[in-house]
Image: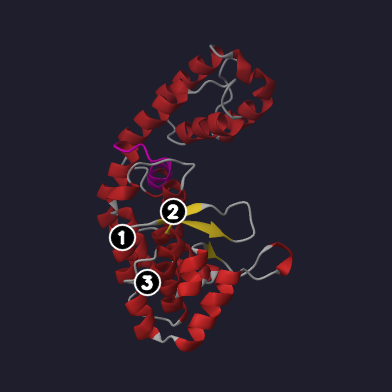
């Protein structure tokens, strides 16, 4: 434990150029002598790096109650420095590291039906500390994964709708638009129109402007289509991409829009 805590960085198995991180080697040595009971004991260690590696050991030992460890972490999370030989390393919550360590153990075809991951995803959706959404931080990234892992039972819709419309979570909005468009039609139209009107084509990425336009066209609502056209007429910055917008309108059966 002392070797791991002294380095005090959550290191993964490979540096650049194939070298092994020292703390990952320490973790591998720990796995040779520690059983599941020992890893459960180490989850209570004061050092968050030790706790994180202990959770990895439990995953590797196929411990059946990983969700309970994940719950313990999100209720009293710690931020640690990570290193994995890539540009994505840096400060991270140990709950997030456990989540992605478990996720990486699954094959793509297992993700949608793995019962342990479903429990972890459920805890994540209802985790209040993740409500303050930021697309650029770890909270945003983990929510994006959770909401693309599967279609959740309808009992989750109220919570996901809260994240979408009260907390302005873009991933929750996209989830409802993809899977429950009819049920949340009114709310989705309002949020997409609000976003569309706020976008400045010149300062926003083309993709954002184009994507929201398409989301609105999917509702097949003549009044909304007319409103989109009027907004576009007032903003000349999109004209350089006019052909792509015309193709988009044509895709949804709209051929006469006056520009």
Compared with 102, 241 (above or below) is above
Q: Is residue 183 visible?
A: no
Q: Earlier in the sequence, mark 3 or mark 1?
A: 3
Measure how far apart labels 2 and 1 are at the Cα level: 12 Å
Q: Which residue is mark 2?
A: 142
Between circles 2 and 3, the one closer to the viewer is 2
Residue at x 51% of width, y 62% of height = 9
Q: Secondary structure at mark 3?
A: helix
Badge 2 vs badge 3, beta-carbon distance below 8 Å: no
Q: Residues within 10 Å of mark 3 (few under 14, many from 20)?
A: some
Disc marking residue 123? 1
71 left or right of 258 in image: left
Q: Is residue 92 magenta?
A: no
258 left or right of 132 in image: right
Residue at x 39% of width, y 66% of height = 47
Q: Earlier in the sequence, mark 2 or mark 3?
A: 3
Badge 3 vs badge 1, beta-carbon distance below 8 Å: no
Residue 151, position as x, y percentages in the image = 39, 58
Q: Secondary structure at mark 2?
A: helix
Q: In this picture, which residue range is highlighted in magenta?
A: 166-176
Position of the N terminus, as image quadrant, is bottom left
Q: Earlier in the sequence, mark 2 or mark 1?
A: 1
Compared with 210, 184 (above or below) is below
Residue 256, position as x, y percentages in the image = 57, 20
């Amino acid at each position: 434990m002392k070797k791991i805590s002294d380095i005090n960085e959550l290191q993964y198995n490979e540096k650049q150029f194939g070298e092994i991180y020292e703390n990952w080697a320490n973790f591998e040595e720990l796995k040779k002598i520690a059983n599941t009971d020992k890893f459960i004991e180490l989850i209570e260690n004061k050092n968050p790096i030790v706790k994180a590696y202990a959770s990895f050991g439990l995953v590797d030992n196929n411990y059946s109650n990983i969700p309970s460890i994940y719950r313990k972490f999100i209720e009293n999370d710690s931020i640690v420095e990570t290193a994995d030989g890539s540009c994505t390393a840096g400060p991270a919550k140990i709950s997030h590291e456990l989540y992605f360590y478990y996720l990486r153990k699954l094959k793509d075809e297992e993700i949608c039906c793995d019962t342990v991951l479903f429990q972890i995803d459920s805890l994540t959706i209802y985790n209040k500390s993740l409500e303050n959404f930021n697309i650029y931080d770890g909270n945003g990234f983990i929510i994006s994964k959770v909401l693309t892992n599967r279609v959740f039972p309808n009992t989750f819709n109220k919570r996901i709708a809260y994240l979408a419309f009260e907390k302005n979570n873009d991933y929750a909005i996209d989830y409802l638009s993809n899977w429950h468009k009819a049920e949340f039609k009114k709310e989705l139209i309002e949020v997409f129109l609000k976003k569309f009107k706020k976008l400045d084509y010149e300062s926003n990425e083309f993709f954002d402007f184009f994507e929201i336009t398409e989301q609105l066209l999917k509702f097949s609502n003549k009044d909304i289509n007319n409103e989109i056209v009027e907004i576009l007429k007032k903003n000349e910055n999109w004209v350089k991409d006019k052909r792509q917008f015309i193709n988009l309108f044509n895709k949804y059966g709209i051929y006469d829009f006056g520009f």
